[in-house]
Image (cartoon, rainbow, N blue to C red):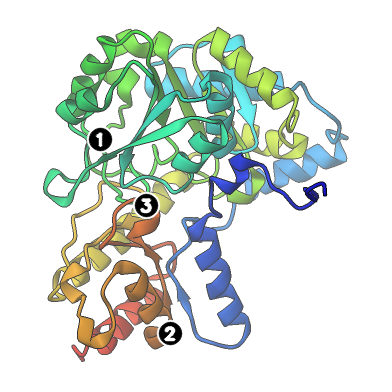
Amino acid sequence: MTKDRTQELAQRVQRIKPSPTLAISAKAEELQAEGKPIINLSVGEPDFDTPEYIKEAAIKAIKAGHTKYTAVDGIKALKQAVIDKFAKENNLHYQLNQILISSGAKHSIYNLLCALINPGDEVIVPAPFWVSYPDMVKLTDGVPVIVKTDFSKSFKMTPAQLEAAITDKTRVVIINSPSNPTGIAYTKEELKALGEVILKHPDIIVCSDDIYEHNQWNHTPFANIVNACPALQDRTIVVNGVSKTYAMTGWRIGYAAGPATIIGAMKKAQSQSTSNAASIAQHAALAALQGDQSCIREMTKAYKERHDYLYGELQKIPGIKCLPSDGTFYCFPSVEGLFNAENGITNDMEFAEFLLTKAEIAIVPGSAFGAPGHIRICYTTSMQNLVEAVKRLRKVLGLG
């Protein structure tokens, strides 16, 4: 009898798991819809509204009929605005054929992996990592090589660790600074040291995920690995987008810059998957890059104020260890000191469930980011909510 394969799934899909951050956020929203006073500190999304001038640009684009297909790699005006942004803010210089506009920075990274990874190729991913990196590598038939960092090293990969992780199968190294989930940023000197290791291995490409570039307050001005090690420019794809910077997560516009050959291959992959990013959102992103940038300072100032409050309060709680963030809108404390078999909390997953059910606070367990024993707290909410969350946390831990 022939085996029925109608429900059989591809191995690449079976290798991966759904995004735990989106799952937890959905659970929190479901409980909120039921009337539960959940404070959702799980979703990495600005709580600010998209600035009015950007929304007006989108409306104007609709009325002007910019609702058709665009070139796969994006409208020329937006690509030029990205080039101008890199030149002005990062002292990096590109041509039009070195820029690709995609449906979010995540899409840019996936395009890169599609363009570069053959079965068995290795991608170095420092942990804690953004949850999607390893699974995107697996989806493209690559092998994620996780380099574990820890609290004592401020969650930063050292040059020695990087060198030890490199093999003849290494194809890509992903660097995310400032980092999701830790909020920690590499200094320019630290990036230079990592770059010097990579320079010794000419087959390796760097993916520099700079999505939190503008949400940084320590180690400023911002620098990525190309700024620190200019010799790597021809081997680095710089990924960024408008989502975090301009509170435009739902608009789905990211961009990548790098060697024309790789960008061209990424464009080819995109042409057979999504084609162009949404035309209307592209015009909104153009307005964002060319318009008033004061909204960035205002949002980052608010994130810094929330960070300072939350970090200060977490420091006061016995059993919690926390490093100050250099940017983003995340804290990543260790909660191992709160584990207790008697109360049924023996790991970060159980602690997250405990907070959700007993304190009605939604956070993401560190295991999702490759760092068991920690939790990620997003302070993309009002200061009032943060004060209430701290109050609930202290109460549920028996601290009054």
> Which residue position is annotated with label 3?
369
Q: What is the C-alpha distance between the residues marked 3 and 1?
A: 26 Å
Mark-to-mark CA distance, 3 and 2? 22 Å
Q: Quadrant of residue 335?
A: bottom left
Residue placed under numbered mark 2 in the picture: 357
Task: Look at the picture and state if 186 lies above or below 383.
Answer: above
Q: Give the percent coordinates (x, y) of residue 277.
A: 71, 33
Mark 3 Cα-neighbour bin, 10 Å: few <14, some 14–19, many ≥20: many
Q: Residue at x 42, y 9 (%)?
A: 234
Instruction: Please indicate whether residue 44 sits to the left or right of residue 178 in the image.
Output: right
Residue 220: give its label.
Answer: 1
- The secondary element bearing badge 3 is classed as helix
Asked where in the image residue 360 lies, by quadrant, the reply is bottom left
- Residue 50 higher or lower than 378, as above or below: above
Answer left or right for 80 relative to 335.
Answer: right
The C terminus, quarter of image: bottom left
Residue closest to the eye, 254 or 136: 136
Q: Position of residue 310 (x, y in %)?
A: 26, 67
Residue 291 makes an appearance in the image: no
Q: Position of residue 45 (x, y in %)?
A: 50, 56
